[in-house]
């Protein structure tokens, strides 16, 4: 009797941590723990000033009537973010006594962090690809992520919040509203564009070419409407500053290319080669791993025939892996960029056939690489090795292609 009871308790505990249907239960427990942890960190760990004052100086220029992007700047240099950033951080400016009340700012970013987790947990709950125990690695194992959110106050987490909101909307097939919030994310920081190739393919798969155009127009309209006050004053200046794709990064901050010489790191040919590699990887994955159509012509002209093609896992896998490829070939990754893919890594790893112990090891090594300051040759090389293993695991997945063949067979049966 006692042995049977113990066995049932053990099985129930095992199910709680390994059955994906219990993600929300574990997730809610972790949210409570994170609330306590965030308050403790804010009250006990010293805030480090990096970009917050510069953000406040940049938006203060707009508040004072300067709408020429070429004239807007802060202590770290010119304003190089799109208009959405300005509006969001004007709100933060007033909420924090003109940026002076750092504690209030930290609690705002703690709220951003908690909401972000809720959105991510919902994505993981919908896909049911990751066991609940993995959420512990997401919440409890990253000093760097907590630092980026509540001790550094970077704008990257705010952009990612809108990205995860848009993905949740895509999962509910609210594509137009999702595109609206996706574009809001882009207007705060352009790294969200790394998800754009995956989104474009999803839209084409769902709607075909002609019906995709209105969704793209929603994205474009958001950018134009938000930028109107600045475009009226100096349109060229706004475009050059807010979407300054050619700006050089400082070698001293790079996390991923420390093992190169600074001369090679700054070499335009090297940066062009990375761009070519990125585009090549997107094309190959797009054609042979993400595309659930028989060919490109069908993708462009034929709307979806069965909703099984656009399922939750397909949406998330395509979006997350699109961004991951961009991270792999980025010409520089700075420490705050970790949030660009941190909450996607667990999903990407657990949909591969990589052994579980290696998945956990990879998470640990990636965390180590991002926590090594200043970065070293070894930390950068380790990061690239981990990225290579993950991308190989994603490429070797066969489930997506099998699903495609199953869908084709089902369509023929229905016909």
Image (tube, rainbow, N blue to C red):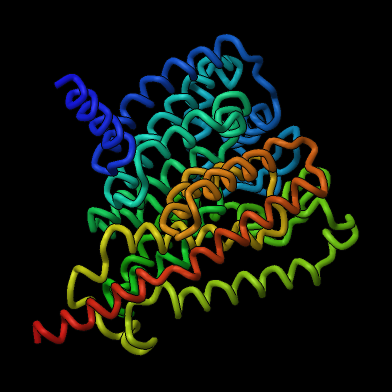
Q: Residue 77, located in which quarter of the rendered image? A: top right
Q: Position of residue 30 (x, y in %)?
A: 38, 26
Quarter occupied by residue 146: top right
Q: Position of residue 87 (x, y in %)?
A: 49, 38
Answer with left or right where residue 79 lies relative to residue 212.
right
**Residue 183 shows up from this direction:** yes
The residue drawn where x is 59% and y is 21% is: 99
Which quarter shows the N terminus?
Answer: top left
Q: Is residue 297 above or below residue 263?
A: below
Question: In front: 120, or 142?
Answer: 142
Foreground pick, 8 / 84: 8
Q: Is residue 302 above or below residue 16?
A: below
| Number of numbered markers | 0
Seen at 45% across and 59% down, the residue is: 352
What is the quadrant of the C terminus in the image? bottom left
Instruction: Indicate the position of residue 57 as horizontal and vertical percent values.
Output: 66, 30
Relative to 282, does residue 11 appear above or below in the rendering?
above
* Residue occupying image coordinates x 50% and y 70%: 395
Whether residue 265 sits left or right of residue 235 in the image: it is right
Which residue sits furthest left? 414
Q: Residue furthest top?
A: 43
As drawn, 34 above or below 288:
above
Left/right of residue 110 with respect to residue 382 in the rendered view: left
- Across and down, in percent, residue 74 comes to 71, 35
Who's the residue at 62% across and 14% down the image?
A: 45
Q: Quick check: can you spot residue 119?
A: no
Residue 353 placement, left or right of 305: right
């Amino acid at each position: 009797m006692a042995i049977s009871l113990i066995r049932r308790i053990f099985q129930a505990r095992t199910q709680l941590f390994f059955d994906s249907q219990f993600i929300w239960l574990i997730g809610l427990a972790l949210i409570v723990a994170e609330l306590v942890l965030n308050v403790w960190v804010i009250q006990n760990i010293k805030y480090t000033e990096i970009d917050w004052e510069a953000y406040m100086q940049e938006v203060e220029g707009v508040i004072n009537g300067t709408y020429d992007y070429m004239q807007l700047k802060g202590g770290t240099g010119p304003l190089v973010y799109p208009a959405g950033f300005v509006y969001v951080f004007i709100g933060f400016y007033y909420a924090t006594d003109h940026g002076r009340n750092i504690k209030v700012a930290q609690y705002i970013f703690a709220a951003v962090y908690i909401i972000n987790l809720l959105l991510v947990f919902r994505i993981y709950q919908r896909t049911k690809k990751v066991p609940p125990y993995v959420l512990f690695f997401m919440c409890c194992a990253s000093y760097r992520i907590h630092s980026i959110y509540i001790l550094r106050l970077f704008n990257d987490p705010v952009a990612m919040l809108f990205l995860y909101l848009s993905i949740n909307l895509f999962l509910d097939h609210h594509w137009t509203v999702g595109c609206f919030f996706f574009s809001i994310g882009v207007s705060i920081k352009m790294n969200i564009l790394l998800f754009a190739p995956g989104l474009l393919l999803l839209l084409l798969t769902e709607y075909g070419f002609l019906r995709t155009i209105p969704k793209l127009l929603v994205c474009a309209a958001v950018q134009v409407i938000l930028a109107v006050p600045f475009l009226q004053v100096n349109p060229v200046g706004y475009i050059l500053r807010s979407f300054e794709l050619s700006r050089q990064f400082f070698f001293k901050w790079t996390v991923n290319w420390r093992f190169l010489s600074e001369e090679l790191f700054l070499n335009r040919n090297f940066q062009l080669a990375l761009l070519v590699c990125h585009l090549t990887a997107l094309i190959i994955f797009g054609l042979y791993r993400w595309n659930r159509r028989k060919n490109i012509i069908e993708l462009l002209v034929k709307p979806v025939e069965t909703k099984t093609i656009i399922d939750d896992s397909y949406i998330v896998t395509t979006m997350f892996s699109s961004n991951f490829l961009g991270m792999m070939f980025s010409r520089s990754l700075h420490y705050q960029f970790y949030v660009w893919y941190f909450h996607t890594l667990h999903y990407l790893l657990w949909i591969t056939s990589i052994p579980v112990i290696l998945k956990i090891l990879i998470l640990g090594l990636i965390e180590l690489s991002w926590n090594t300051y200043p970065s070293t040759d070894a930390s950068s090389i380790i990061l690239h090795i981990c990225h290579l293993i993950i991308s190989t695991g994603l490429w070797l997945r066969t489930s997506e292609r099998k699903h495609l063949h199953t869908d084709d067979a089902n369509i023929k049966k229905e016909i």
